[in-house]
Image (tube, grey):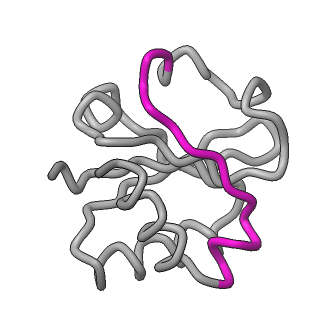
Amino acid sequence: MNKNIVAVCENEASAKALQEAGRELGFNIKFEIQAKSEIKNELSENDIKNAAVVLFVISYEVEDIENIERFIDREYYEVEPKFVINDAKAVLNEIVVELN
């Protein structure tokens, strides 16, 4: 199974929680932060192409993501940041179940 996941997070706390949980579960997680129409640590086209799934950790609409066209034709999941911050392992495990 491809264990590469890319994430668009709206805050550092959710990105950090995902990375820690991913490390413990054996996933390679790359992320970018999108806040106030600004992208920090922008994901490369190669990162997106090689990912099994895109995870949008946002509390706003997916359509409002900056440069959304990069993620067209990619399987994706949406989750609110509070769920990732509270239990990122559970979120990642749920995605694994869906992918299998």
Would residue 65 appear left or right of 15 to someone viewing this image?
A: right
User: Per the image, is 38 magenta?
Assistant: no
Count every numbered label the image shows and give the total.
Answer: 0
Can residue 77 be found in the magenta stretch?
Answer: yes
Q: Residue at x 48, y 20 (%)?
A: 70
Viewer-closest of 26 and 20: 26
Q: Residue furthest left?
A: 1
Q: Is residue 35 positioned above or below 38 on the image?
A: below
Residue 81 in the image: state x and y as whole percent. 72, 65
Instruction: Give the quarter of the image for residue 24.
Output: bottom left
Residue 87 x/y as whole percent:
59, 82
Residue 48 versus residue 67 in the image, above or below: below
In percent of width and height, residue 9 lies at 62, 54
User: Residue at point 28% right, 79% down?
Assistant: 25
Query: Which residues fall within the magenta stretch?
Result: 72-86
Q: Check the image and report above or below for 9 versus 16.
A: above
x 76%, y 72%: residue: 82
Q: Residue 97: image x %, image y %?
A: 38, 60
Residue appearing at x 33%, y 26% in the figure: 45
